Image (cartoon, helix red, strand yellow):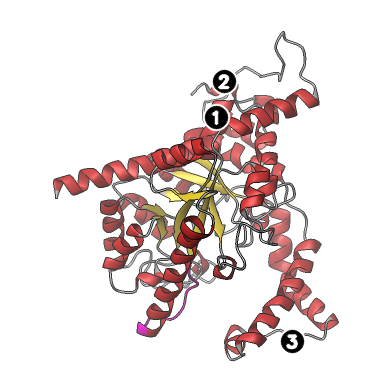
Amino acid sequence: MNRSTFPKLALPFWAALLLSACGEAEQTTTAVSSQGGAIETEAQLIARARSIHARVITLDTHADINTENFTDDRNYTQDLDTQVTLPKMEAGGLDVAWFIVYTGQGTLDAEGYAAAYANAIDKFEAIHRLAEEIAPERIEIAYTSDDVRRISLTGKKVAMIGIENAYPVGLDMSRIEDFHARGGRYLSLAHNGHSQFSDSNTGENNNDYLHNGLSEIGRQAIVEMNRLGIMIDISHPSRDSIMQTLELSRAPVVASHSSARTLTNHTRNLDNEMLLALRDNGGVVQTVAFGSYINEERRVFQAERSSELRQEFADEMNFSLLEPDQVATLSSTEQAAYREQMSRIISRVNAAAPAATVADFVDHIDYLVALIGLEHVGISSDFDGGGGIDGWNNAAETFNVTLELVRRGYSEEEIGMLWSGNLLRVLDDVQRIAAEIQAQA
């Protein structure tokens, strides 16, 4: 990797200082120019960016799903109001979407585990239904990096599967192998709330933890994921859990949708110590286009004013805000109506907050590249799960990320690494190490 192509003058002041402090600042600048040395026009730069975007494999590691959008009558072949559909992927040149088997954290008992497992299986089956029954001529599931490249060459889109929260595993560790057989290629041990495997980042605000990091079965799960070839996702667990995971794992890990905490002080982001440990582990952090994770002003606004504005907007609409346990007592029709009204209120709150932009997003990429090296940084959206920013608010706008990277002087090789090469390298390493573990056994 020729890091002299990384343009010092394009860096924000903090990144230049960080490069200097790390001893990596180079006394070179890269003028964006066309052949023959003339300064590149805006039209030429955009054309060059489009050419690069068409050649590299673009991969987004986090797109949430609602299984109601994976039926014969309503599905991703249509122009739905979701941030990801096949038409939007095609319009924006997004080649690979990791669809997420997400389960919210519930009670740590047999009833909770059973409901969580049913939810997970429903989502696995929905993803397979899209790729194998609804639109097999337009999208195919990949299980390896070779699959990704092979499918991309056919012109079809690629689906991969990530599992957000190991809660559906319950206490039956064989389910991890079952999820791997269903196509799961990364798994996080917790989400927003402590699971049976790991503490969550949500414990940080009140210093309220269940395991002080990983539980004993959480440690066993890491061993099992290493054995099977599942990437361990560290995006949602607590800081102690993340550091313990990095010590225990024999294989590189992935932070599937997190950004830099030094720039935006959110518990979902990784601080420098965690990032450097991830680098030493050989892993990759997938910078996430989630507004309050990449723009500090937006984060502060939402932390300080979100509840107040929700109540204000609800009063305007003569709408009563309910606690989660109250929502649970509503009928399914009433719950749907409540969620629709809440969506309107949340949209108004988000619109009132300072905007987060593609430039903010690439600021985080710049920072991460300067701190831990370009080979440890990737890209994710968290579409249909709260993600989306000005300029990249759905899959149809994916080109805008490449355009901003080109503006900042990243080369085609570097852009390819950020979009997919680094993540696929980690997947390869994880699967290679799994094969070695199985051979030793």
For label 1, the residue is 414
**Quadrant housing residue 353:** bottom right
> The residue tagged with tag 3: helix, strand or loop?
loop
Which one is in front, 9 or 230? Answer: 230
Amino acid type assigned to the residue bearing label 3 in the image: Ser
Amino acid type assigned to the residue bearing label 2 in the image: Ser
- Locate residue 285 relative to residue 73 in the image: left or right: left
Answer yes or no: is residue 293 visible. yes
Point out the residue furthest to the left here: 441
Rendering coords of residue 23 (x, y %): 52, 26
Label 3 and label 1: CA atoms lie apart by: 50 Å
Which one is in front, 164 or 97? Answer: 97
For label 3, the residue is 320
Label 3 and label 2: CA atoms lie apart by: 57 Å
User: Mark 1, residues whose alpha carbon is within 10 Å: few (<14), some, or many (≥20)?
Assistant: many
> The residue tagged with tag 1: helix, strand or loop?
helix
Sequence order check, earlier mark of 3 and 2 = 2
Which one is in front, 256 or 154? Answer: 154
Rendering coords of residue 262 (x, y %): 59, 48
For label 2, the residue is 4
Which one is in front, 379 or 283? Answer: 379
Label 3 with label 2: CB-CB less than 8 Å: no
- Locate residue 68 relative to residue 48 in the image: left or right: left
Q: Residue at x 60, y 86 (%)?
A: 332
The stretch in magenta equals 102-110
| Image depth: mark 3 or mark 2 in front | 3
Residue 376 highlighted magenta (yes or no): no
Label 1 and label 2: CA atoms lie apart by: 12 Å
| Image depth: mark 1 or mark 2 in front | 1
Sequence order check, earlier mark of 1 and 2 = 2
Answer yes or no: is residue 238 visible. no
- Locate residue 7 relative to residue 273 in the image: left or right: right
